[in-house]
Image (cartoon, grey):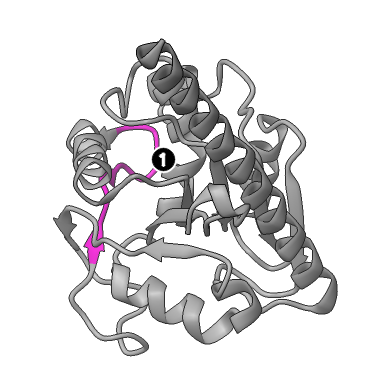
Amino acid sequence: MGSEAGIARKPRFLGLHGFRTSGAILKKQIETKWPKSILDKIDIVYPDAPFPAQGKSEVEGIFDPPYYEWFQFNKEFTTYTNFDECLAYIEDIIIKQGPFDGLLGFSQGAILSGGLPGLQEKGAALTKVPRIKYLIIVGGAKFRNESVAEKAYSSPIQCPSVHFLGENDFLKPYGLELLESCVDPVVIQHPKGHTIPRFDEKGLEMMLSFLERIQKYNLSEDQGKDLCYEEEENALEA
């Protein structure tokens, strides 16, 4: 599907799953709860996190193992272990399986997704790959580690983002904190807890509108690249 035909390509997202779950679990959650009208407009790749779960998973008995985690942390969520290894692992996935337009994250994956654009802008992560352009955050929050947070949120998060906030999600207050760092975020409220939600009519309209908007951005960007390529070719022929 080329931009020459005026057809916008589907945006491509890297899906980062929750703590002690897996890529297959996130895929199943999204594909069973989100309607075809959404799934037809987006491509999502679902990798597993780099580290096997180092303890019991909250989804044991609901979803089959194996389970994975992106990095480890203390009880206060302020000290991280294997965080740099996690960032390098995500960058390697993007290099090998990209390019990606944006990140989609749930829970621990959403915390990563919301913080990575700022870390990338500061040169602290994803320095070998194109910039993250869009975010889909489900049950997110901010990093609590002081040095990481300082880099991640020192500037407003400029990329278009959509945030799912659950009325009964224990992370909701922290998801609201993340919103304060985002420029013009789209917020979809739902009545559930810490989960991938289904859409009500209003939420579905908002999500479709968000995807349509970023598809238009991609189309204009691709057409701009085509124009630059044509100008280069003409300059070489001259």
Amino acid marked by disc 1? Glu
**Res 123 quadrant in image:** top left
Check the image and report above or below for 227 versus 57. above
Q: At 62% from the left edge and 71% from the top edge, which residue is drawn?
A: 193
Residue furthest front in the image: 238
Q: Assess whether residue 70 is covered by the magenta stretch.
A: yes
Residue drawn at x 48%, y 46% as measured from the top left: 102
Residue extending furthest toward the right: 202
Percent position of residue 20, x then y: 29, 65
Does residue 230 sit above or below 67 in this rendering?
Answer: above
- Nearest the viewer among 30 and 213 is 213
Indicate the position of residue 185 as horizontal and vertical percent values.
Answer: 73, 42
Residue 154 shown left or right of residue 12 in the figure: right
Report the magenta residues as a range. 68-79
Q: What residue sits 54% from the left and 28% below the top? A: 227
Q: Is residue 144 visible?
A: no
> Which residue is nearer to you in this view: 225 or 212?
225
Residue 21 percent coordinates (x, y) = 31, 69
Q: Quadrant of residue 195?
A: bottom right
Above or below for 18 versus 181: below
* Residue wearing tag 1: 76
Magenta includes 188? no
94 relative to 189, above or below: above
Q: Is residue 89 left or right of residue 4?
A: left
Q: Residue lying furthest bottom in this view?
A: 61
Give the total number of marks visible in the rendering: 1
Relative placement, left or right, of 51 versus 212 is: left
Q: Residue at x 64, y 28 (%)?
A: 158
Q: Is residue 104 left or right of residue 84?
A: right
